[in-house]
Amino acid sequence: MPLRLSGELSFTVDGPQGSTTGTAHADGTVLHVRAEDPVAAWDAVAGAAPSAAGGLGVLADQLAAEGLSIEVSGPAGRLATVGAGADSALGRAVTGSRHVAPGTPTALRPLVVSQLRQGVRRRRSVLLTLAVVVVLAARRRRRSS
C-alpha cells in the first residue's frame, strides 16, 4: 500500500540569519513547505546539519523510493523539489542525487547571493590573516638582515 501524507502545520525556525515562519501541508504524496524567508530557513537547517547537501541527497533518494516528494517554496516561487518527480543533473552534482531539482532562478537568487556573501566573508578573513602573517614574516626577515 503506497504511503499517503495528510496534514498541515505552521513552524518557526531560528538561525544565524534570524528567524522565519512557514507552513507545511501534505496532499497525498507531496509535502508542500513554504518559508517566508528562505535564507533564514536554509541557514537554520544548514547550521543544525553541517552536511545538509549530502544529507539532502540521501533523503531525496529515500523519498523517491517511497513515491513521495517535498516541494519547497518561498515568496518568489519554487526553490526545490526533492524526491519523486525530481530529476536533475545539477541536483546530482550538488547533493549526489538526481532526485533534487532546483527551482526557479528568481526564487533561488536570495539563497545564492547569501551563500556567495558568506563565502566572501570567510575568504576575506582567511586572506586578511594570511596578509598579516606575510607582513610579520617580512618584517622579521628585514630585522634579522
Image (cartoon, rainbow, N blue to C red):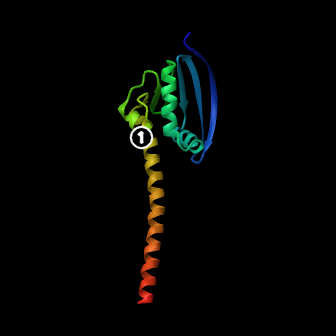
Q: Name the residue under label 1.
A: 109
Of the residues shown, which amino acid type is indicated by label 1? Arg
Residue drawn at 54 percent across, 29 percent down = 34
Image quadrant of residue 112? Answer: top left
Q: Which of 122 and 108 is in front in this view?
A: 122
Q: Using the image as rendered, state which of residue 18 and residue 67 is in the foreground.
A: 67
In this orientation, which residue lies closer to the viewer: 121 or 132? 132
Q: Please provide percent x and percent y for residue 96.
A: 43, 35
What x and y, as percent, mark residue 83?
A: 47, 25
> Given the current orientation, which residue lies at the most extreme left position?
89
Residue 85 position by quadrant: top left
Please tell me which residue is depicted at 62% across the width and 38% down the height of the picture.
Answer: 13
Q: In which quarter of the image is the C terminus?
A: bottom left
Residue 111 visible: yes
The number of numbered discs placed on residues in the rendered structure image is: 1
Q: How crowded is mark 1: few (under 14 residues within 10 Å), some or many (20 or more)?
A: some
Q: Where is residue 10 in the image (x, y as percent from the top left)?
A: 63, 28
Q: Does residue 116 lie above or below 103 as drawn? A: below
In the image, residue 55 above or below residue 26: below
Q: Looking at the picture, does residue 119 appear above or below residue 3?
A: below
Q: Which element carries disc 1, helix, strand or loop?
A: helix
